[in-house]
Image: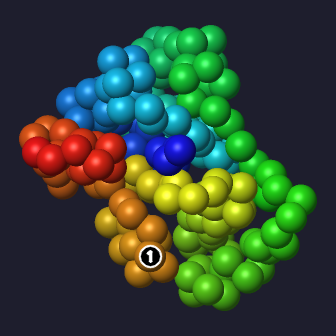
């Protein structure tokens, strides 16, 4: 059985709740209908949850959204999405049969710098360590609107969805192709 696990980073998760380029695609992708009909599993890293709240605060402080909206979005995520629609995982491996990839190895592998783009390392570490648990043709897919991070992950052989760059038709085709259907 193929498990389709979509790892959302903060840039993509925010689009589920804040209107930006790619929001319609993320809303379609994360809808219950799309999730169930395509056998998708949504995952976020613990760091994404922390960063999500900080980004909402930043949006409120800069006037992109109101403080009331930021608070409401955060409550909605915490009460209705976190651990229900989006499973939250850490960096630790979930298999006891394969070795865990350390964050230092990830930093070296992706050439990440502490204090600059090291948060991306935690997300990628979760993907790598989750892959050790997935079997057969299962393959994690990163959902990100961060082009540089997406390119890094794609360069390591992982599939990447950038909802801000794809049309809704392209998103639908991607999900159908992941199911093995013709478009």
In the image, what residue occupies the spot 66% across and 87% down? 108
**Which of the two residues, 65 or 122, is positioned nearer the viewer here?**
122
> Would you name the residue on which mark 1 appears?
157
Residue 85 percent location from the top left of the image: 54, 23
In the image, what residue occupies the spot 84% across and 72% down? 99
In the rendered structure, the answer to whether residue 49 lies left or right of residue 59 reads right
State whether residue 19 appears in this view. no
Q: Which part of the image, by quadrant, shows the C terminus? A: top left
In the image, what residue occupies the spot 33% across and 18% down? 33
Q: Relative to 127, is 39 above or below?
A: above
In the rendered image, which quarter is residue 169 located in?
A: top left
Q: Relative to 87, is 108 above or below?
A: below
Residue 92 percent location from the top left of the image: 81, 56
In the rendered structure, the answer to whether residue 169 lies left or right of residue 126 reads left
Circle 1 sits in a helix, a strand or a loop, which is it?
Answer: loop
Residue 22 percent location from the top left of the image: 23, 41
How many marks the image carries: the answer is 1
Residue 125 percent location from the top left of the image: 67, 65
Q: Relative to 19, is 131 above or below?
A: below
Q: Tag 1: Cα neighbours inside 10 Å, few (<14), some, or many (≥20)?
A: few
In the rendered structure, the answer to whether residue 19 lies left or right of residue 37 reads left
Q: Relative to 59, is 139 above or below?
A: below
- The colour scheme used to paint the residues is rainbow
**Which of the two residues, 77 or 168, is positioned nearer the viewer here?**
168
State whether residue 118 appears in this view. yes
In the image, what residue occupies the spot 29% across and 54% down? 162
């Amino acid at each position: 059985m193929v498990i389709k696990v979509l790892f959302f980073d903060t840039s993509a998760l925010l689009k589920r709740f804040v209107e930006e380029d790619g929001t319609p695609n993320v809303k379609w992708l994360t809808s219950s209908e799309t999730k169930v009909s395509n056998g998708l599993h949504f995952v976020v890293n613990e760091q994404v949850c922390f960063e999500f709240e900080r980004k909402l605060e930043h949006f409120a402080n800069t006037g992109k959204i109101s403080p009331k909206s930021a608070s409401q979005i955060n409550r909605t995520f915490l009460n209705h999405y976190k651990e229900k629609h989006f499973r939250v995982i850490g960096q630790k491996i979930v298999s006891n049969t394969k070795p865990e990839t350390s964050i230092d190895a990830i930093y070296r592998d992706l050439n990440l710098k502490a204090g600059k783009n090291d948060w991306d390392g935690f997300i990628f570490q979760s993907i790598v360590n989750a892959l050790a648990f997935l079997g057969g043709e299962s393959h994690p897919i990163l959902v990100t609107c961060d082009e540089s991070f997406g390119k890094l992950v794609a360069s390591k052989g992982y599939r990447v969805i950038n909802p801000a760059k794809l049309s809704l038709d392209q998103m639908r085709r991607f999900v159908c192709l992941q199911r093995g259907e013709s478009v």
